[in-house]
Image (cartoon, rainbow, N blue to C red):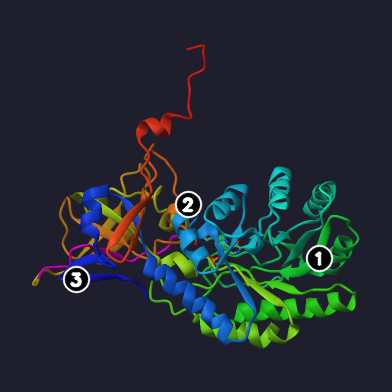
């Protein structure tokens, strides 16, 4: 459910007309709805509570690292899951207390570990032995023991797109299942870390519960083994991954997901950490774009829009489907036509949709890409020297530009010509 609806044939975000933002901010732009963010967080957090779980929801900032988005969740009591110093700084700047931040990622650098230890965050999810040894040194040098979980790779097939599956043994993530006990024993022997838990994340955009159940049961078995080894496991970080509908999928509800968690792990007396990203922000955002040209090709009609693959990479990268809808609904009697919706970038991959049925559109008309709040702006680039798209946050009848479109001078400001020119 979201708060992008038509009023009198025109698309609104809450009480703000999209066409008004387009006029005032220019296109393309990302638009997020506060009410939708709040609703998603609340439904998710309430589902965990209702299942009797003592859970901390750490928003996976990678899905949408905008300061105002993170702040919206922070005000609701959310924590943050970060994967870089940049995201950690962003979460802190947005007001997430360090005690609610977990740091994940396979390649944390020395500097990033030092920074995280200095900030006193809740937990670092360690993904390899070399990282474990380095972290212990870093923390011991500061005279602290850093609370850690080891991210284990449960070798479960998440049944999702190959590029976003992470829990199979051939993936680079986590510590191999069969070696987990050994690495835990090593961790126990180190002076700079305090083992508090097990972490696990098997992939993203999961539309079935079974892979979660399988992974959670494996975590359960591991907890029993580790406890038998005398390790006080008291926290379980179960990652993110619950999918959202893009194209008629029916992913499990937060309540069903929480139920699986409670059934498999609820009796272990552990504090649960979850790291949802897409679920919280996905359908709270749209990308708004304007039609530049309608071009009649030899075999099809192209709608050439002013957003491109650099602004929303998911279709080019994962063949992902995003709903596309007109900002002004079809007038009576207008029949949909089949079009290819493409951007201006010089690659055939810059195609948002093929043979999509849309009301007839003309140059200058506005359209919106749905479910663009997750991994949309977050993954954008300046390819073709296109400025990053601005982000707008709506709240009731107000809106604010929460990330500005950079000027060309600002884009060039980090570059310089060597003095030999
Ligand atoms: N925790 C960890 C350790 C992760 O690696 C991820 C996502 C999450 C949590 C959040 O997962 P979510 O709840 O959002 O599924 N760019 C891709 C998705 C990449 C996901 C990477 N890891 C896409 O656009 O589909």
Task: Please report whichever mark, 3 or 1, sits nearer to the chain's N-terminal start.
Answer: 3
Would you place residue 349 above or below residue 14 in this image?
above
Q: Give me the C-alpha separation between circle 3 and circle 1.
A: 54 Å
Q: Are marks 3 and 2 in contact (CB under 8 Å)?
A: no
Residue at image point 84% right, 46% down: 141
Q: CA distance from mark 3 to mark 2?
A: 31 Å
Please state the horizontal and vertical placement of residue 123, each as a whole percent of the image.
Answer: 71, 61
Residue under label 1, please give it: 195
List the residue tagged with mark 2: 379
Q: Which residues are magenta?
A: 319-331
Q: Residues within 10 Å of mark 1 (few under 14, many from 20)?
A: many
* Image position, residue 246 (x, y; %): 40, 70
Residue 107 visible? The answer is no
Tell me if the residue at label 3 has its CB under 8 Å from ligand 1. no
Q: Height in image: 237 above or below 70?
A: below
Please report the residue visible at 15 percent of the width from the left and 71 percent of the height from the top. 8
Q: Is the N terminus in the top left, top right, bottom left or bottom right quadrant?
A: bottom left
Q: Can you tell me which quadrant of the image ligand 1 is in?
A: bottom right
User: Element under label 1?
Assistant: strand
Residue 7 disc label: 3
Whether residue 24 is visible: yes
Disc nearest the viewer among 3 and 2: 3
Residue 154, which numbered label?
none
**In which image quadrant can residue 316 be found?**
bottom left
Q: Residues within 10 Å of mark 2 (few under 14, many from 20)?
A: some
């Amino acid at each position: 459910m979201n708060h992008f609806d038509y009023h009198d044939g025109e698309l609104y975000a809450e009480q703000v007309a999209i066409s008004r933002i387009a006029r005032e901010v220019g296109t393309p732009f990302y638009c997020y709805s506060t009410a939708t963010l709040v609703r998603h967080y609340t439904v998710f957090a309430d589902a965990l509570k209702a299942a009797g779980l003592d859970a901390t929801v750490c928003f996976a900032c990678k899905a949408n690292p905008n300061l105002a988005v993170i702040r919206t969740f922070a005000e609701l009591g959310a924590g943050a899951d970060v994967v870089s110093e940049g995201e950690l700084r962003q979460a802190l700047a947005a007001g997430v207390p360090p005690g609610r931040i977990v740091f994940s990622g396979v390649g944390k650098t020395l500097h990033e570990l030092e920074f995280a230890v200095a900030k006193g965050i809740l937990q670092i999810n360690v993904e390899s032995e070399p990282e474990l040894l380095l972290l212990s040194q870093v923390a011991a040098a500061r005279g602290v023991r850093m609370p850690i979980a080891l991210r284990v790779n449960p070798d479960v097939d998440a049944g999702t797109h190959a590029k976003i599956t992470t829990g199979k043994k051939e993936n680079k993530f986590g510590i191999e299942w069969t070696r987990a006990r050994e690495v835990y024993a090593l961790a126990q022997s180190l002076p700079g870390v305090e083992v508090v838990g097990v972490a696990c994340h098997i992939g993203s955009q999961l539309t079935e519960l079974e892979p979660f159940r399988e992974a959670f049961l494996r975590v359960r078995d591991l907890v029993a083994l580790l406890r038998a080894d005398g390790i006080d496991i008291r926290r379980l970080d179960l990652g993110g991954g619950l999918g959202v509908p893009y194209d008629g999928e029916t992913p499990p509800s937060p309540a069903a997901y929480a139920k699986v968690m409670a059934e498999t792990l609820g009796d272990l007396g552990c504090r649960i950490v979850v790291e949802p990203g897409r679920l919280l922000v996905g359908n709270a955002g749209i990308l708004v774009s304007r039609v530049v040209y309608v071009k009649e090709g030899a075999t099809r009609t192209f709608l050439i829009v002013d957003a491109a693959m650099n602004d929303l990479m998911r279709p080019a990268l994962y063949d992902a489907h995003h709903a596309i809808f007109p900002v002004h609904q079809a007038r009576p009697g207008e029949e949909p036509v089949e079009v290819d919706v493409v951007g201006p970038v010089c690659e055939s991959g810059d195609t948002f949709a093929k043979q999509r049925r849309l009301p007839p559109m003309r140059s200058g008309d506005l359209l919106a890409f749905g479910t663009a709040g997750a991994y949309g702006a977050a993954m954008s680039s300046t390819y073709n020297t296109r400025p990053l798209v601005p982000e707008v946050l709506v709240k009731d009848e107000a809106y604010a530009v929460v990330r500005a479109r950079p000027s060309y001078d600002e884009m060039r400001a980090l570059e310089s010509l060597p003095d030999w020119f």
